[in-house]
Image: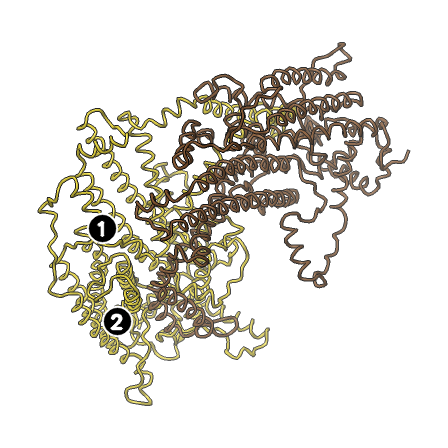
Chain colours: A brown, B yellow
Amino acid sequence: MSTQEASPDPELDDLYDNWYIDEPQGPVVQPDEIIVPCLPTLSDELYHLIMAPVSLCALLLLSFLIRRRKLCISCCWGVPGVLSPLNLLEASGSSWVPCAVFGLLVSSIVRLFLDPTAMNFIPNNYGGLLGYCWKILALFYYPALYYPLLASNRLDGPRAQKTIGYSVGTILSWMHCGALIWQKAECPQSQQYYRYYSLLSTLPQIFCLVVLSLMYPVLLVQQCRRSSNSKQMSNRNYYLKYLKNLLKSKRSKRSKDSVSIGSQVSLNLCSYLCPPHRGLNLPLRPILAVTVSVLSAYQVALLLLVGFLPTVQKIRGAIDTELVLMIAGFGITIDDDKQKSVEYIVYYIWATEVCYITALILSCTVTVTMLLRSLVKHRWALQCLFAGQASKVFLDSRPLQKTSPTLASWMSHISYQASVTCIGLILQHLLLFIFHMIVTFLIIIPIAYGKFQILRKLLENTWPFWLLLFLVTVVHQLCARFLFLKGNPSQITRRKSLFMLTYLMFPVNFLRGELLALARLVVSVIFNVIHFCRLDLSLLQHSAQGWDPGYRNYCNFLIIEATECHPVVRAFCLLIKPNRWKQPDLEEGIHLMPADGRLMKGARSQLARARWGLAYTLIHNPSLLCHRGHKSINGGSPTCPT
Amino acid sequence: MSTQEASPDPELDDLYDNWYIDEPQGPVVQPDEIIVPCLPTLSDELYHLIMAPVSLCALLLLSFLIRRRKLCISCCWGVPGVLSPLNLLEASGSSWVPCAVFGLLVSSIVRLFLDPTAMNFIPNNYGGLLGYCWKILALFYYPALYYPLLASNRLDGPRAQKTIGYSVGTILSWMHCGALIWQKAECPQSQQYYRYYSLLSTLPQIFCLVVLSLMYPVLLVQQCRRSSNSKQMSNRNYYLKYLKNLLKSKRSKRSKDSVSIGSQVSLNLCSYLCPPHRGLNLPLRPILAVTVSVLSAYQVALLLLVGFLPTVQKIRGAIDTELVLMIAGFGITIDDDKQKSVEYIVYYIWATEVCYITALILSCTVTVTMLLRSLVKHRWALQCLFAGQASKVFLDSRPLQKTSPTLASWMSHISYQASVTCIGLILQHLLLFIFHMIVTFLIIIPIAYGKFQILRKLLENTWPFWLLLFLVTVVHQLCARFLFLKGNPSQITRRKSLFMLTYLMFPVNFLRGELLALARLVVSVIFNVIHFCRLDLSLLQHSAQGWDPGYRNYCNFLIIEATECHPVVRAFCLLIKPNRWKQPDLEEGIHLMPADGRLMKGARSQLARARWGLAYTLIHNPSLLCHRGHKSINGGSPTCPT
């Protein structure tokens, strides 16, 4: 569907070009407007023909590496294991690699649908059923192509395996990055929409690949230097620190009186987007969601820009006195002087362009602000849920239960966030463009040039009305303040006069009500359009908020996040099972109770209490931790001097 | 502003008429289409020239009647008092007369702005500053004209005064009603919009006047028969009954198992719009608001109907083969056969008309349903506030304090509700019309006639996409249900596969997300448009609901209603101050405590407790009530046999 909207028939496009440029100017094309078709040495076909087998080989290599150590006892090679792309339920850790790969993926997918030339290397891909089938295939091909880039980061085996993983990642990312940069350096210009569109739309991909090409070598070097379980240590430290933070006595509140007003304002502004840390790290998934949302919004914004601006600039360049005569034929006279008319029209078109660009910039800013704000809200919601205050978040007391729709929503949340951001950006841009056009053409130009004085004429005719409405509003407020309310707490007095005034002002209030209805419409449209890209807010009022599919998806996502990533539970598990520190399968499910569940209720609570007591002791006496391991711990623990 | 939209220049209108009818048919006007200009015997000028002085005289008469009895001691005639139009803070009593007068008023005002001929009797009233000034004058003239109709009902003096008041009301309402019916009987047709528009738009006024003409004689007869304080008795009984109801032990819940499914469904449907009474009468103001809203919505709906239908029907009648040829000149061919083409075009226009009318009927139904629903919600909110559960209503704990903005909002609530209903009806109609057009032209006509097969072509090209999205949704649900969730309470298992599936499905979920974003947009637009006319719901989500000016107005209104109309407080006052039964100034403020407020805290609570004890005794022993009066009570009390 988006292809239909985004990519009009190229023949039709040419036709319009002819209409606007050729008719007034004749078929004279400026020499700097000619774009020579360019074929890079490493064409797209060749790129995919090389990279697809390389990725497959890397994938096979990596999957033969893992799990072998477990099954090594029974057979020599073992079966190749399932490569986990990333741990989406981890509460901390570096998120550079996953963010870069997801960004790469979303940029490829959005380009696939917005840029009709993205799949030019496949024969007969234009339109029709076959084109769609190719695109469906591409939907599965791209994640498979980039899979090894992600999986190289997640090998949880011994040191040698990790080294191999990072090496594979380095080589692959360098190959991808080099190929893309080579292509774009050879052929920076293309014929679609705008000469640099292809280059600009590839920039996020290049950026993500550069990040990967830098991160993998860094990881490789770190791996060679550091001990093997230092990453798990950092995770463990985070959970234990969080628990310690919780068990500490509450800090005394800082007095706010001594802070100056300026710094207080900046503090409030700052806390709107990045509140104080308070010990809780953001999980990986919301960060991923915001990253892919920003990158897909970039693609949409770029398309909005290049789909409008070059065309309008061409039209602006082609305005001349002939067009003014043609317009005059329809009865529209702009100015008596022809040359001045041309100047005016050019100026108006230029003003429209400015409105369009400022609206686009503003909508991008608003979208990014909203996405950052949603991170803040997400952290707040997680903290509330961790503290058991579900009703504060959902405004009703729903059970935090994992059901299959909940999990299905969790699986699709990142992509939903990105999609909703794209549509939200378009809506925002539309709204802001209309707003800017109204301000420019009904307020600024009439004041500056004396044209389009629609508002002035309207005001000249209707000013008694506006004066009346204003006076009635003032009378209402004054009467309510000084006549009808007396005493403290206020009591209504002079009731007969109050009722009489209410009755007599009824018709005028009816007119004020029309203004209120208009204000209601405008406020709700503006608020809902601005917050459209935030899935953590419902667009409906609270009693019907569950009907908003986006918000419902977010609620389900939040339930899974809160139940799976509770840092206190994780810290507890780490404390009472020190022999599991080294093993990578903490994530494979936390079992605090015996699996058979045949313990009596009393014994169970006794056991739980004993365990909590143990955990409490250990968190306050970290030096005891190292003496609890059943097996000796490889490498030095930061809390236990050896 | 509404005049600008609603009343296009009549000359322009004629021009269009010429365009559509005369060009294809020649200047042949059907004899049944000629509307002879009609001048009624009682013209509008004459009507206002007679009724304005009569109303003024009635007003003076009534204002000389009241208060005289109070000041009679010092001087012979006393000063004329302020005529209270109606008691807007009364919780019960007949609301026929106020509803009829407010309905009359709102019909006049809406007609004044929607019907350009409503003020034809004033010279030079078309457009311009002068026309607006006349309209502003009319905004104050109409409430003054109908003031005596309302005030006649509110004379709280002795029997003779009431009889005079009702007589005046009867005479005035008969005069108004007779004049209007006479005018319309003589000249039922007019030239504006549609021949019967003027008649149809006057119908609500006639209806309201008929109600008044019937109610005043009935009141007069009742007044002659009944005792003078029986109305206050009925009020008093309501408050006491409410208190009794509260103090009774709670009723046992009826078992719902024995009820059949059919009756349960109808019970639920019924309780959506008219829940069980539970002792609390609705106050007058919300009833007034709903009445005026319905009447103003009728005027708007009528204008929507007559502004569209006759024109389109004329166009439909003027379609012939020449038009088909003209359309073919633009390259649009509907059918090879010319006659069939004409039939098709006529059929399409007819289908559009049907869509328009059904959308209008449906939007009127929805508006009325929403208004009735808002009454239910208002009753619920009042009950919650009476029970002290303000946070249940406002979702935050705000103090129920009367401030001047609160009171100002309360004064304008009825008219705001009517205005918002008008705009809401227009929005609903627009939405439903678009929806009906889409359904008709993209679904019904393609299936029935094989035309406009846009959807089929789209589906033929893109079905692999829809199949893919459907399959992926099913796969997500099935995997979540049977693979990744195990045990009770559910635990997430096979995490590596879950993460891998999440990653691989990311691009497809991106497409599903676009559908979700579309669904979000559609759901929020539909919900907010349908609920636009309900001021008791915010159009924004809960954390920003105060930014909705309509909802804020309703909240302020609700605060005043709840603090002023608490039936328990009123019953309490009635119980402990029996000598005030007869006096009309219960409404003049309830003073439970000594005015100087110099009592100590202990003494105060002791006094309050003693008073509540007294009230509790009296409500359970109503026979004691009649022995408490300091003065003897005129007329028989229903609870105290004399």
Q: Nearer the viewer, residue B556 or A38?
A: A38
C-alpha gap between disc 2 and disc 1 = 40 Å
Front-most of A231 and A305?
Answer: A305
Disc number placed over residue B148 in the picture, else none: 2
From the top left corner, tell me how far across and down residue B286 is, in percent. Answer: 37, 58
The reply to the same-chain question for discs 2 and 1 is yes
Q: Amino acid at mark 1?
A: Asp
Secondary structure category for the residue under label 2: helix
Relative depth, front residue between B264 and A414 = A414
Residue identified by numbered label 1: B13
Q: Is residue A118 above or below residue B421?
A: above
Residue B38 seen anywhere in this rendered image of the structure: yes
Is A363 situated left or right of B582 in this image?
right
Toward the top, the furthest residue is: A76
Q: Residues within 10 Å of mark 2 (few under 14, many from 20)?
A: many
Q: Is residue B159 left or right of residue B541?
A: left
Q: Nearer the viewer, residue B172 or A432?
A: A432
